[in-house]
Amino acid sequence: MKTFNAHFDGRVIVLDEPAQLKPNAKVKVIAPDEDVPDNSLASDCARLSEPAFRAIWDNDADDVYNELAAMAQDPQVQLELRAVKNRG
């Protein structure tokens, strides 16, 4: 699925950027209510995505990454990494 910016010119919906679509391609148009700020759709989509992101990111493998990131901040580890880099 692709997202394109567009506007309604009073008669038809006009894409704001070129799009490679086949003639008669089916599209879905989502128009926010006029009294809703422009960014509310993005905020709603982000909020609805939170459970999926939580399931992906909240796992044991993520803990290993956090440990590695913490180790990388250790001055002794940084010194050893620089030494290895200078050798190679």
Image (tube, rainbow, N blue to C red):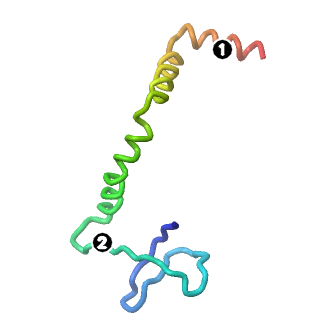
Residue 26, x across and y down, in percent: 50, 81
Instruction: Please say if 45 is above or below 69.
Output: below
Residue 78, x across and y down, in percent: 58, 14
Q: Which residue is mark 2?
A: 32
Residue 20, x across and y down, in percent: 61, 76
Which is more N-terminal, label 1 or label 2? 2
**Residue displayed at 32% across by 61% down:** 39
**Residue displayed at 33% across by 63% down:** 41
Q: Which residue is mark 1?
A: 82
Quarter assignment of residue 84: top right
Instruction: Please say if 26 is above or below 82.
Output: below
Residue at the left extreme of this rendering: 35
What kind of residue is marked 2?
Pro
Q: Secondary structure at mark 1?
A: helix
Of circles 2 and 1, the one toward us is 2
Quarter assignment of residue 24: bottom right
Q: Secondary structure at mark 2?
A: loop
Q: CA distance from mark 2 to mark 1?
A: 53 Å
What kind of residue is marked 1?
Arg
Q: Is residue 86 left or right of residue 77?
A: right
